[in-house]
Image (cartoon, helix red, strand yellow):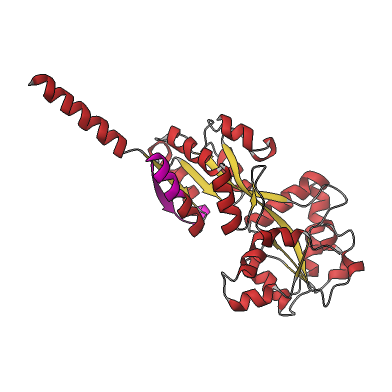
Amino acid sequence: MKKITIISILFSFVSSFTIAAEVNVFNARHYKADAELYGKFTNKTGIKVNLINGKSGALEKRIISEGADSSADLYITADAGRCGAMDAKGALQGGLTSGPIKAAVPKSFRTSKWVGIAKRARIIYYSPERVTGAELSGMTYEGLADPKWKGRLVIRKSSNIYNKSLVASLIANNGKKATAEWAKGVVANMARESTGNDRAQIMAVAAGEADIAVANTYYLALMLSGNKGAEQQEAAKKVKAFFPNQDGRGTHMNISCAALVKGAPNKANAIALVDFLLSPQSQEHFTNNTFEFPMIAGVSPSPLVVNLSLIHI
């Protein structure tokens, strides 16, 4: 009887442990497609994904303020700049070095503490009715400060993380002094005060408020898909995409990233989730639903994004 009782207790303990398998994701990516992937991960592994949704700034403050008491395993957000900032604050730990991660993700898009799970390009959109091929020929990010664009440019606020990362790349390539002068030129060329998200900049070009805009690739694809309504779909058809710096370093690419939080209580489960997000099936899910570029080789972008890259002067 005692042996049976002990076995029963052990079985109950193991069962409880299995049921309790979980991973806590502090999530700043608010896409239905992501939630669907987390559900698939749970179905495959039995590991429950607990989502703590919020804006990047609020999630970062919570992780840092809670310190060793934080329940966060992974911090998932939409820009490498944010992952880098969290690393600089000592909020992350190493461990994202599994075979699948190393095999799938180029070194330029990962460290041992954070890894890219999808890519996006920050490009130029223009009105084909008001912008000529000669104006765009050989266009670069540096060219956005050219006086010929005075009163013709729209772009999000400089505080936006996408623009911060773009500026960081300009500093890396051109230096702080030249980039500071560039920023002054961009401000001088703006058609209006910065307002709204990336889609608002595209809408401004479609409405004739500006001739060119800077925005990420997936926004136009999202608009063209019809997921944001007929009005935005029609507006998207009125603009064209241009990938700058093709004669030099190439177009600025950024990532959505997953970062391993220091003191993660479910570290192994967190790594398993990142491995899953980098699988071909998950990458296809991203490209077909969020319209980002895949992080891994062997997966094709959405046709809507492919068509964008075919549009050149």
Question: Residue placed at 54% from the left, 47% from the top?
Answer: 282
Give the answer, above or below, for where 63 lies relative to 139. Answer: above
Q: Is residue 178 left or right of residue 159?
A: right
Image coordinates of residue 153 in percent, x first then y, are 77, 70
Q: The N terminus lies in which quarter of the figure?
A: top left
Examine the rendering and report whether any part of residue 304 can be seen. Answer: yes
Left or right, 268 with respect to 14, comes to: right
Q: Is residue 45 magenta?
A: yes
Q: Is residue 71 visible?
A: no
Q: How many marks?
A: 0
Q: Quadrant of the C terminus?
A: bottom right
Q: Which residues are magenta?
A: 38-57
* Left or right of 188 in this view: 288: left
Farthest residue, direction left: 1
Indicate the position of residue 77 as horizontal and vertical percent values. 55, 50
Q: Residue, x 83% and y 77% (percent of image)?
A: 130
Q: Nearer the viewer, residue 23 or 296?
A: 296
Residue 307 vs residue 129, the one in the foreground: 307
Along the line of sight, which residue is nearer the eye, 179 or 162? 162
Image point (68%, 37%), residue name: 106
Check residue 309 for magenta coloring. Answer: no
Q: Is residue 4 above or below residue 131?
A: above
Q: What x and y, as percent, mark residue 283?
A: 58, 48
